[in-house]
Amino acid sequence: MSTSTKSDTALDPEAAEVADGLVENGTLPGAAQDAAAEAARATTDTSFVTDTSIASASATEARGAQPRAANGRFVRTGEDDGLPTDRFLDREISWLQFNERVLQLAADENVPLLERARFLAIFTSNLDEFFMVRVAGLKRRIATGLAVRSASGLEPREVLEQISRVSHELLDMQARVYDDLVQPALEAQGIEVVRWDELSEEEQAQLGDMFTERVFPVLTPLAVDPAHPFPYISGLSLNLAVLLINPKTGKEHFARVKVPPLLPRLLRVGGAGTSTADEAAGDTYDVRFVPLEDVMAAHLDQLFPGMEVHEHYTFRVTRNEDLEVEEDDAENLLTALEKELTRRRFGPPVRLEVDREMDDHVMDLLVRELGVTAAEVYRLPAPLDLRGLNIIADLERSDLHYPAFVARTNSDLAPTESAKARDILASIRKQDVLLQHPYDSFSTSVQAFIEQAAADPNVLAIKQTLYRTSGDSPIVDALIDAADSGKQVLAVVEIKARFDEQNNIEWARKLERSGVHVVYGIVGLKTHSKLSLVVRQEEDGLRRYCHIGTGNYNPKTARLYEDFGLLTADPQVGDDLTKLFNQLSGVAPRSKFKRLLVAPRSVRSGLIERIEAQVDAEDAKKGTGYIGIKVNSIVDEQIIDALYRASQAGVRVDVWVRGICALRPGVEGLSENITVHSVLGRFLEHSRVFLFGTGDDVEAWIGSADMMHRNLDRRVECLVRLSDPRHLADLASLMKKGMSGHYSHWALSGDGRWSRRHLDKHGEPLPDIQEDLIEMHAKRRRKARRR
């Protein structure tokens, strides 16, 4: 079957790459690459950031062999059910397209300036994690012979080549966004990042004193010679590569100096108590920063007395930092994970970023000693590692940030704001409460729910899952208080939450010392579900209060992440959660649930069953079938194939996805009834919502599971079915807004490219759906006060 799209104007992927006219860094010799990049940078044209993806997530050619999923399972092909073999987009390139959307926000002059700086920092953090986990994992599978062709049809080494090409283009684009767009805009607002030679003598003297007092004592210069082997370079550390000349012998020496990660990356010039006269007379908003590595480079003579500093360049290494813990063989999972965290620091390099001006001689030394290939080297303009822009993004300039926003208490919990805490349990007894964070305050809802339960003398037990939470979490403190007061407290802690392992180990031990029963879930599965169960003695017997959410129990991220949560005292949900917690803490493999779908047993099969029910509904009466899905990522081939079959049957399918999407919408004969949108903005869209049917026949589910293999096969995930007609209407309305096209969004086409749609026909910005939701929740509160 052909997979030609409905769009007659879509470019062939290869032709589109030529039309983009972007330099493919890493495929040219060093000098030619530098010259090409400088020529591209010489123009003031800003069209290098387009509204369409620079690369397609579609395989470059259809594969005749049967494709496999990322976990090695064979995927059903057209030979089985008439579906084309090239129906899946590549998940790795799709992720890079997501990060490209972040970069497009950084380039958008309609986004507040300091938020644009933050989006540049987020882009860097995102890409770092992608290389540490996804690229490193792919390289490891190739090295061990375990890698198989991806579901998109690409061979493992083809995927690596695509990743390298697109990553080089995106990093070059990021550098241009910073150099040509964001940095000049910051300077126009009196915010400058200057280099050492741009400072006055007085400013250099002030920073020199600061270097002597605060920086010099923590530096450790490491030389390379027969007595000093090449030093270990820690992952994501910023370093100075220094070429030294011995003036007596003329011999050349190499040294490395690590930029201290615990010191601010950008140093404020003329800070408090050291302002120059010119600055004191200037605008109070004016501020200047100099990179820490520039200050260090200017004082290298103090680190190597008696030597001549010939050259110095910055570089940065990314290492494999994914963890492997054999739980079956681990006598104590906590101890095993702590050992693996120590080994993580010594993972093999997967990427080397270097100053574009670096001498080839120094480059060859780094490549040889680190054991990286030419394709793994990324030549970039200084400064490297734009995570440091978070310092600028944190400046108190309200005129350059998003408008101030303060979350309010959900009107079902408290019609009016009050300094006195409302009785959360009484509100839940009255009716189910559907929360949407950050529009609904986390601290006055979920946090208050757990804190009040901990303090309530009639509460007998609290059971809680914890995946990621803040280091000073009030949730953890409340559980400790509950245990101290004699309540039965169970915490199902997922200590393998990636890059939060150390934090989770620390507060797991803290909970254990306080008498909380701490368990680590089921061997071989991550516990990713977001669950809380409170058992309370009341006049008519025991009552169970529940919270099931889509986001973590983390007060900090709850102010930035969009998530849903259900507070309910429904007996069926209480019975289901009791069974599920017993399964997590004990042995209950045959539990059956009434209002829950639980992975790895029933989420995939339950959703496919409901997708197929919409096909039956559409067959019975045209126009009645509908499927709406809002997730972070959709990759699972079985779910996607079910959606394709629903589309072929005439069912309208809306997919609202933030990140990866392996589904190809708008393909004639396959997916012309499927629409895929993405929304990025001030809040991170994090909720998972599943809608089936229309009108009075709507069925709605929320929960923790994305449509990925790891969520459906290797994690404990939980979805809950909503029953309140108000909540069903709210979710249907949200999906309708998100897919309407009336708000700023990105749309995915069948050729595997995303297109940004943020301007109306007059060139004016389209409304922002998150701003609309802020206003909608404010109106809802005003209406509740009038009741």
Image: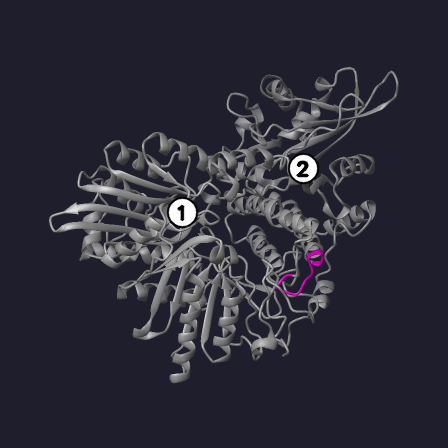
Residues marked 1 and 2 touching at CB (< 8 Å): no
Magenta span main SS: loop
491, 146: nearer the viewer: 146
**Residue at the spot of label 1:** 552
Which is nearer the N-term, disc 1 or disc 2?
2
Horizontally, is 251 left or right of 649 in the view? Answer: right
How many tags in the picture? Answer: 2
Q: Percent from the top left, x then y, of residue 54?
A: 65, 60
Q: Which mark is residue 640?
A: none
Residue 64: x percent and y percent? Answer: 69, 71
Magenta-span inclusion, residue 157: yes
Residue 453 x/y as whole percent: 24, 42
Q: Position of residue 206 (x, y in %)?
A: 61, 20
| Nearer-the-camera pick, 221 or 440 | 221
Quadrant in which the C terminus is drawn: bottom left
**Which quadrant would residue 723 be assigned to in this image?**
bottom left
- Give the alpha-carbon distance from disc 1 to disc 2, as whole Å: 32 Å
The residue stretch that appears in magenta: 150-158
Q: Amino acid at mark 2?
A: Arg
Residue shown at 67% from the left, 38% from the top:
317
Left or right: 538 as drawn, with respect to 392: left
Q: Secondary structure at mark 2?
A: strand
Q: Is residue 109 above or below residue 362?
A: below
- The residue sitting at 44% across, 42% down in the picture is 398
- Indicate the amino acid at tag 1: Asn
**In which quarter of the view is residue 71 placed?**
bottom right
Image quadrant for the N terminus?
bottom right
Q: How packed is label 1: few (under 14 Cα within 10 Å), some, or many (20 or more)?
A: many
The quarter of the picture where residue 73 lies is bottom right
> Depth-wise, is mark 1 or mark 2 nearer the camera?
1
**Which residue has dot 2 on it?**
316
